[in-house]
Each structure stands twice: as C-alpha cells, then as structure tokens.
C-alpha cells in the first residue's frame, strides 16, 4: 500500500483528491494488491474485530466476518439508477435525477471518513489485455471490502497496467457510513460511469465491481457497445467422445448457479468432464466467427454458504477450506464454521451468526440464510484452463432457469433466438434470501436480471434481439427448471450432478441431433431423450416433469401480458408477437384434439 503522496494515474489522483476533500479521511492508502498488503489488512481487521480468526490448523487463511444484523443482503428498494431521463432507467429500476441523487449523497458522504482510512482499490474486471475487460477504482473505508475486492477482482497494479494512460475507468465510491438502513443508498450513474454506495457493508451493495459495475453499469455499456452483460454462470462440458462445449446459464440469485457451475458428473455417466469458467456473471461478445464468446469478469466466488456440503457441491466445499472469508456463518467451539446443510450434524452448542450462544433447540438459524463465502477462483479444482483466456469461450447454449414448483417443465427449447429472448423475458422465480424482503414469493425476473439491469428492460429486450441479429451462429436457448414438485411438495428431479442428463440433451440439440417434441411452449425431449442410466426415475415421473398443462399456461399468459404492458412503447413488437403466438397455441391446446405434442423426430 502506498500513501497519498505516491505517484498514481492522473485521473485517479484527481478523483482521490475530490473524494478526500468531501469525506475527510485521516489517511489515504492506494492498494497495490500484494500479499504483504493483504496480511497487514488482516492483522488490522483481527485487532479491530472486523475479522475473527478461524481455526488456522484446519482452515488456513480463513476468517469470519459478522455484518450488522440488518445488513445481510442486497437492498433493492435502496438501489437506484440515476439517468437524466427517468424513462431510460425504466419501470424495473428505482430512479432519481442525478443532481438530486448527488446532492443527497454528498450530504451523507461529507465527513463520512473522518477518523477512518480511505482505501483506493484499482481493479480489473476480466482477463488482463482482453478486449472484454474493464477497469474500475473503488474508494472505500472498509477493510472487509478491500480484502473481499482483492479476492473477487484482479486488484492493484494489474488494473493500473491494463488502464495505462486512459481515463476510461468506473469511479466506485463506497462508505459504510453509519450502517443505518435509513441512510443507505446504492446509486448508479451510467451516464458518468460511476457508482456511489453508502450505509452497507454487504457484498452485493459494497463490492462495487460485482453487481454495480459488472452488471448494472456493464449492461448499459454493453448496450452502447453491442454486447451483453449477464447474470450467468459459464460451464464447460466435455463428452466421453472428447467434444467440448460451453453453456451459459442465467438463474436468479441463490437458485443454484454455483452448484451448476461446479457440476460433478454422476458415476453412472462415466467419461464426462465439467469445468468452471464462472458462477455468477458472464460478459458475452459477438466474435468474428459469428458466435457469441464469453468471459467471466470476476476473479473469485461470493457464494451462498447454507446448503453447501460435500454431498451438494464437493468442489465448493473443498475450495473453501483455505484463504476464504466467511460472512455470517455460525462458529463452533473448535474455531470452525457451521451452517444449515453442512455435512456435520448440528453442534451441541455454537455461536450464531450474530455472535449469540446457539443450540439445536434455538428457534433461529445458526447461520444467516444468506451467509456467504468469498474465495479465490484459483482454489476451484474444476476451474477451466480457459478462465484467463482473453478471447473467452464460445457459447453453444444459453439456459434460463428459475425456482418454480409448478407449471414449468424440466427443460424446453426455444424455436430460435427471438423466441429464446421471449423465454428469458418471461422468466419468473420464487424469491430467495439474497435480497431483503419475503422469501418464496413468485416474481418476474427477466433473464434473472431484474435487480441488475442498469436501464429500461424494454430497451434491454430490444438489445437482446439486436445482438441475436448480429451473430450468424447464435447459441440455442433453453428454459430449465430443477425445482418442479409433486402434489405433496416433493421435488421431482434430483438436481445437482444429475442435471448433466438434461445438459446432455441440450448439447445433442446444439450438435443437430437429439430428438424433440414440439409443444405450444417450445421443444421438449421425448422421455427416451433424457439419459436415465443409473437414475431411478420412471417414465411416468419424467412425463410429469416434462408436462405442459394448458390450464396452468393460460394463467401464465395473462400474467405475462400485464408484465409486458409495464414497458409501454419500449417493449419490442417482436416480443408481443411471441406473446400472442403463445396465447394462440395454448388456446388451441385446450381443445382436446390438440392436446398432444407433435413428434418432429429431429
Ligand atoms: C449474488 C446475488 O450475490 O445475485 O450473486 O445476489
Ligand atoms: Mn448473483
């Protein structure tokens, strides 16, 4: 770390001076991203209580951070997109005029860092030297944020080297302020490529490279520059015959992206290999070969801890045994963390995520449902050798998935890119603990981007259609749903590694083989199209998983119409056309003679 007097990029220096004049820190430190710097920050955080040391013999380099109890998830109602015209932010975002937002936050930032150190963290999103990559600089007064940014991004000198003399970097200003939700705001200014966030230390609100830059601002940049910034995992799959494919998958927060990105093929599917490129964000650009190429702009994983075990995600479980920051998990007496869904049974006693004594009789959970791990990607045993490839990986299929107990089949395929855009645009999912608010409520979450699209979603859908038109070899698009239940509420599909059975059909389709049946909503596999070797699922059960119930879809179509109307003239006509086509096909399906899908034998 260098202090304020050290030489640094002129544009960054000027911005540091402006921010320091407003926030009046005691000292300013510019981070270079070295190990020595990290060790010093850890020592200081242990002394201040911002970190608690975990059992270093069992978990070397692992620490626990406890956040303020009311600061444990993204706060969408306090997140704003501040464009000059309200219409550009769209009905999907909270909006405030930039001068009003700046005035409000200037008031809160004034003197906010008095008595504190102001850290300046230059960071790079994407591989160095890649045409995909973007530079940001985060100014923060939180050591936890600096340490987390060093894991989640390529931070320090590497970012400055990529930036060179250019002034094209995102200005990300953060202060934990007084952590009061009454004075908490996450404001995005796409027109001036900046973010101001105050009052929260939670990752999604405070690690500004992630949701703020890599999704909200990047989606705006992507629209201007002709690419896509998406809430997607990137998974590599190699078949026993040695054919390699890459799949991108958009799923709402806490719906299993990390598990799918680290998929372990079932023992009954020998020869398959899976590799992880990313678990949360994909930047996709048209390539000169007419395909869509993707990079993961992040450098680490910020995953949901509860439910992570050797059974559900052995790769993640192993990856978090060292050099990991745990946030809001429970602490056992031997200094190791515990959470609901851990392989070990509940401990007889522990300290809960808020630092209070806990026993299995306690009415509250030991770990917060949105407790997290922050871990370097390099620790993931299945990390793809293409992770650092500046050209990215070519995407063969895009999945849109959500958490849906009813109506939505295990998998179905779009007719084409336009229909696929419609499938993404009509995605809805049951809410999870990743954002504040009620859990389990069904809400629209187009492309899993509702909380992250930095502009009017009507224009975003139009942009998807434009990108599709600009590529000659577009990926095929699929809807998947691992969460369908029976009448008793039991999951019908085992999920996890067995999802490869569905992906196998997806890949067969991308290779121009694999049978499909046309239904009113898209192509579904015939029951024999899903490899069930070694899996105890009957034809009836699989038929139930793939069922398209016309009565349920009538209801869905009506809901879609209301949702689309929100976007007024911004909603592309092509999506209305898809909507009416679907309505028409469902209506036809309700007449008994049309009830059956047609076997196209493709
Ligand atoms: C995340 C989220 O943390 O989507 O990735 O909330
Ligand atoms: Mn996410």
Image: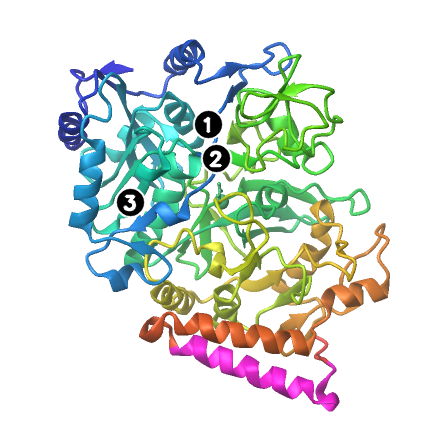
In this orientation, which residue lies closer to the viewer: 494 or 515? 494
Q: Secondary structure at mark 1?
A: loop
46 lies above or below 549: above
Identify the residue position indicated by label 2 in the image: 72
Residue 96 rendering spot, x and y as whole percentages: 24, 53
Vertical arrangement, residue 86 with respect to residue 198, above or below: below
Q: Which residue is mark 1?
A: 67
Q: Earlier in the sequence, mark 3 or mark 2?
A: 2
Q: Does ligand 1 reach within 8 Å of label 2's beta carbon?
A: no
In this picture, is 199 found above or below 500? above
Q: CA distance from mark 2 to mark 1?
A: 7 Å
Kindly identify which residue carries mark 3. 187
**Picture quarter with the N terminus:** top left
**The quarter of the displayed image where residue 43 is located:** top left
In reply to whether residue 585 is colored magenta, the answer given is yes
At numbered mark 3, what does the secondary structure look like: helix, strand or loop? strand
Q: Is residue 146 left or right of residue 549?
A: left
* Contact, mark 2 vs mark 1 (Cβ under 8 Å): yes
When asked about the image quadrant of residue 567, the answer is bottom left
User: Does residue 263 appear to the left or right of 278 in the view shown?
Assistant: right
Residue 86 seen from this side: yes
Mark 1–mark 3 contact, CB under 8 Å? no
| The quarter of the displayed image where residue 469 is located | bottom left
Secondary element type, mark 2: loop
Sequence order check, earlier mark of 2 and 1: 1
Crowding at dot 1, Cα within 10 Å, few <14 / some 14-19 / many 20+, comes out as some
């Amino acid at each position: 770390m260098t202090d304020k007097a050290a030489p640094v990029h002129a544009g960054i220096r000027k911005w540091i001076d402006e921010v320091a004049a407003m926030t009046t820190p005691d000292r300013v430190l510019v981070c270079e991203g070295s190990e020595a710097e990290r060790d010093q920050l850890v020592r200081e955080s242990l002394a201040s209580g911002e970190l608690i040391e975990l059992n270093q013999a069992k978990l070397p380099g692992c620490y626990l951070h406890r956040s303020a109890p009311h600061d444990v998830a993204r706060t969408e109602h306090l997140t704003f997109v501040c464009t000059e015209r309200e219409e550009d932010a769209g009905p999907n975002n909270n909006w405030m005029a930039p001068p009003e937002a700046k005035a409000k936050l200037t008031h809160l930032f004034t003197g906010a860092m008095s008595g504190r150190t102001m850290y300046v963290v230059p960071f790079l999103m994407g591989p160095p030297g890649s045409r995909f990559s973007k530079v940001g600089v985060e100014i923060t007064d939180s050591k936890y944020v600096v340490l987390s940014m060093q894991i989640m991004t390529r931070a320090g000198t590497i970012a400055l080297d990529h930036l060179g003399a250019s002034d094209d970097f995102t200005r990300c200003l953060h202060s934990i302020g007084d952590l009061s939700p009454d004075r908490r705001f996450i404001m995005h200014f796409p027109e001036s490529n900046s973010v101001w966030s105050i009052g929260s230390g939670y990752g999604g609100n405070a690690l500004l490279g992630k949701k703020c830059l890599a999704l909200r601002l990047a989606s705006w940049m992507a629209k201007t520059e002709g690419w896509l910034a998406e809430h997607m995992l990137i998974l590599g799959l190699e078949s026993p015959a040695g054919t390699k494919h890459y799949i991108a998958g958009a799923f709402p927060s806490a719906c299993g992206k990390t598990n799918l990105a680290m998929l372990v093929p079932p023992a009954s599917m020998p020869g398959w290999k899976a590799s992880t490129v990313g678990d949360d964000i994909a930047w996709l650009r048209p390539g000169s070969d007419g395909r869509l190429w993707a990079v993961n702009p992040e450098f680490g994983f910020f995953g949901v801890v509860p439910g992570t075990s050797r059974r559900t995600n052995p790769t993640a479980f192993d990856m978090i045994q060292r050099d990991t920051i745990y946030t809001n998990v429970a602490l056992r007496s031997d200094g190791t963390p515990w959470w609901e869904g851990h392989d070990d049974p509940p401990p007889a006693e522990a300290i809960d995520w808020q630092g209070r004594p806990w026993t299995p009789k306690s009415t509250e959970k030991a770990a917060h449902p949105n407790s997290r791990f922050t871990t370097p990607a390099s620790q993931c045993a299945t990390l793809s050798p293409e992770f650092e490839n500046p050209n990215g990986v070519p995407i063969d299929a895009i999945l849109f998935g959500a958490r849906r107990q009813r109506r939505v089949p295990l998998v179905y395929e779009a007719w084409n890119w336009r229909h696929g855009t419609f499938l993404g645009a009509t995605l809805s999912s049951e809410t999870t603990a990743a954002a504040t608010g009620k859990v389990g409520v069904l809400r629209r979450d187009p492309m899993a981007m509702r909380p992250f699209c930095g502009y009017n979603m009507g224009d975003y859908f139009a942009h998807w259609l434009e990108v599709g038109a600009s590529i000659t070899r577009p990926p095929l698009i699929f809807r998947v749903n691992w969460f369908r239940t029976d009448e008793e509420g039991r999951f019908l599909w085992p999920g996890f590694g067995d999802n490869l059975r569905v992906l196998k059909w997806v890949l067969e389709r991308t290779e121009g083989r694999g049978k499909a049946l046309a239904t009113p909503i898209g192509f579904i596999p015939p029951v024999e199209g899903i490899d069930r070797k070694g899996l105890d699922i009957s034809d009836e059960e699989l038929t139930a998983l793939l069922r398209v119930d016309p009565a349920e879809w009538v209801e869905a179509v009506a809901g879609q119409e209301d949702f689309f109307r929100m976007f007024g003239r911004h909603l592309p006509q092509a999506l209305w056309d898809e909507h009416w086509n679907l309505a028409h096909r469902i209506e036809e399906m309700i007449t008994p003679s049309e009830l059956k899908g047609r076997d196209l034998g493709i």
